[in-house]
Each structure stands twice: as C-alpha cells, then as structure tokens.
Image: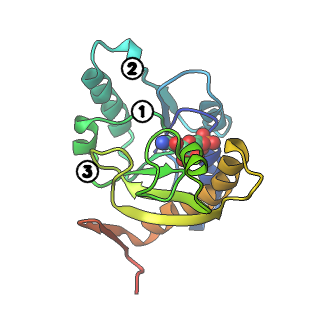
Amino acid sequence: MVLVSGSGTNLQALLDATADPTYGAQVVAVGADRDGIEGLARAERVGVPTFVRRVKDFTTREAWDEALAESVAAYEPDVVVLAGFMKLVGAEFLARFDGRVVNTHPALSPSFPGMHGPADALAYGVKVTGCTLFVVDAGVDTGAILAQRVVEVLPGDDVETLHERIKVAERAMLVDTVGRMARTGWSVEGRRTRFGDDA
Ligand code: GAR
C-alpha cells in the first residue's frame, strides 16, 4: 500500500519493481489526500485500485485520520509506504499500523526534517545530503531509520537540481529496502532497525 500527494515517481519505481515476481511485494492499492495528481494516474494505468481522502471533506483532522486508516486497512497491507505523502498521519493511524508505516524523506535524518529538506540543506551549505527511509512515529521525520543514501551537493545546484538528484537515490533506496523488508522481514528495537538477512 502506497500513499502519495504528488508526482509519484517513488511510487512508479515501486510499481516497476513489483512487475518482477521475485521482488517479493505487490502494491495492493494507492491512496492520496488530493485528486487529480499524477501519482493516482500512475496506479490507474496499471490497474492498481486507488482512493482519495481529503482533509477538507472531514469536520476534524482526527475524523480524516480515522477514515484514512479505514481505507488503508481494507487492503490489509503488510507495509504502508508514504511516498511523497505531504500530510502527517495521526495517532489513530499509527496505532493501527504500528511499526509498519514507512516514509521516505529527501534529507539525511536527523538533519532537515519537514517539508523543505532539499532547500534547507542547500541554505545550510552542507556538502552532502541525501535521503532517509524511516519507520514513522509521532514526530516529524524522527522515526527509526531503515536506510539512507548520500548525495553530493554540487556548486551549481539549485533546489530543483538537488532534489532531482536526491530523488534518483531515493527511488533506488525505496525499491531496495521495501523489497528487502518484504522478503526477509524487519524489526525495530528502540532507534535501531534490523532486517531478516542482517549478518
Ligand atoms: C520525495 O522526494 C519525497 O521524499 C518528498 O517528496 C518527494 C515526492 O516525490 N517527501 C517529503 O518531502 C515529505 N516530507 P514523488 O511524488 O515524485 O515520489
């Protein structure tokens, strides 16, 4: 199960990977918090079911969170991947899918959490940044880290070129790690994560 808010290139990478039966995982559905986005179209093109739950259609944020959780639960996913999902999921959602919600973030955690990872890294002047896949907890981009990839910041970079280069690394990280989780299992002990095939 994948949740998206935008262009869905990370989702596309997962959809492409799952075409190989040895990958070990399937995308059972794609959910979004808004209509008319390319992420939903990508799922529809390959016949994966989609749904939309918009915050503004609910009287409270909690009601939205519960409805989102219900929609996700209907597909009985083993893992819920937030791939460019630009909303924080709430307590009810996390309680329901405890330890099974993962998010990809375009910075090297714990640096630059939030909505502007590439811009914040550029503004700070770091020479390397990257991407992080983590198990979602109640904080903003604070959960236990499953994988990270390093990306160099080049002298001519602007936010767009840097983010695009991060996204190349991010897609590979996501595909490699979600497949590994599906094939070997994973565990979380405090802040540390392990995979079933760890030495
Ligand atoms: C990705 O870089 C993802 O890490 C980022 O949005 C992009 C979505 O791209 N998410 C966040 O910044 C969340 N804080 P995509 O829609 O092409 O997969």
Q: List x then y, in percent, for residue 101.
A: 36, 49
**Residue pointed to by mark 2:** 55
**Residue pointed to by mark 1:** 87
Image point (53%, 46%), residue name: 117
Mark 3–mark 1 CB contact (< 8 Å):
no
Task: Determine the image quadrant of residue 175.
Answer: bottom right
Mark 1–mark 2 CB contact (< 8 Å):
yes
Query: How many residues crowd around disc 1 within 10 Å: few (fewer than 14), some, or many (20 or more)?
Result: some
Quadrant of the displayed image that contains ligand 1: top right
In the rendered structure, the answer to whether residue 153 lies left or right of residue 93 reads: right
Q: List x then y, in percent, for residue 182.
A: 44, 64
Mark 3–mark 2 CB contact (< 8 Å):
no
Inter-mark Cα distance, 1 to 2: 9 Å
Q: Amino acid at mark 2?
A: Val
Q: How is the image coloured?
A: rainbow
93 in relation to 199, above or below: above
Q: Earlier in the sequence, mark 3 or mark 1?
A: 1
**Residue pointed to by mark 3:** 98
